[in-house]
Amino acid sequence: MDFNLLNNIVLFADRSALAILIAVGISGMWLRSYPDALRQVTVILNCAAVTCLAALAVTTIFVLFLRTASLADVSLLETWPYLDKVINKSHFGTTWLGRCSALGIAILLYLACRARFAQIAHASILAAGLYIAFLISGASHAGEDGLLTWENINNSLHIASACAWGGSVILYAFIVRKLNNSHYAVGDTAQRLTSIATSALVTVLVTGLINAWLRLTTLDLLWTSDYGLVLLTKLLFVFFMMIIGATNRFILIPALLKQESHNQIGSPSHTYFRRGLYVDSGVFFIIIGFAVSLALLSPEH
């Protein structure tokens, strides 16, 4: 398999798992205000958390081998002699070790606490997810001058908020289906979700604009460089996702609340809302693909 293709596949899986993991942490925390709904979807949250933690454990290993191959300019099969040097004597190695520590602690806390102390379990994976997003940014161009620079903090917020936005949409598509099948009203929880998603979206847009301003030295690079063209394409899908979100927030959710106040659960509005979440989820996966491509491109090319 082509090295660049494998790199894209691994990073796509890694960012998708991170997004859903952060969403599980957020959902587990805010659904505590809806204990009946939380009981209905506990299995979904647990399955998603375990799957994403396992996926991140695998992609973390692959990321190390792929970055080592890139830094040493060797094939994947020739990386073994260079692993120790990359881990212990490079900036990437420092961030990778931090990521391993965060992931390991999250796995242990989640497995130990999910049955009796679910709030601690969800808080731990949320904290780990946010810290991993910070370290992912730190291992990129944004962290070249240090982890606590303005550029890296801004890019970390961009990654974390994008994960919270899109990951919540993906996870909630499954939650809504489960709640609908259980004849549980989803209007109130959906309204809270849109508040979280809106806050995350605002952060995504602001930090994204700052990223573009920092990385594109001239405006014409938007249409004369591969980086700029990929960025513009990504923004088109972000805009499409925003339209779906606005439709949910201002049309479908008010309709859900009105119908549920008359005990009308399972109405066409519920179906449209659920299908909209499926489409939104698909668009977010496309956005992740473009984000991964941007991470591997130089703004000057």
Image (spheres, grey):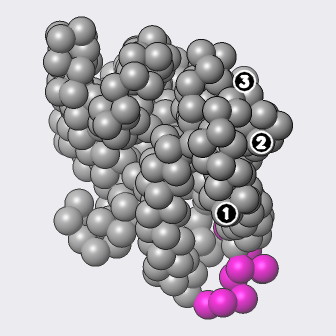
Residue drawn at x 73%, y 70% is 232
Q: Which residues are magenta?
A: 218-227
Residue pointed to by mark 1: 250
Residue pointed to by mark 3: 1
Label pair 2/1, CB-CB below 8 angstroms: no
Q: Give the residue type that dot 1 points to.
A: Phe
Camera-nearest residue between 123 and 284: 123
Q: Quadrant of residue 141?
A: bottom left
Q: Is residue 34 left or right of residue 245?
A: left
Q: Earlier in the sequence, mark 3 or mark 1?
A: 3
Is residue 226 on the magenta stretch?
Answer: yes
Residue pointed to by mark 2: 269
Q: Earlier in the sequence, mark 2 or mark 1?
A: 1
Q: Quadrant of residue 169?
A: top right
Tell me residue 15's x, y (percent): 51, 39
Is residue 247 on the magenta stretch?
Answer: no
Magenta segment main secondary structure: helix
Residue drawn at x 53%, y 71% is 205
Relative to 218, is 100 above or below? Answer: above
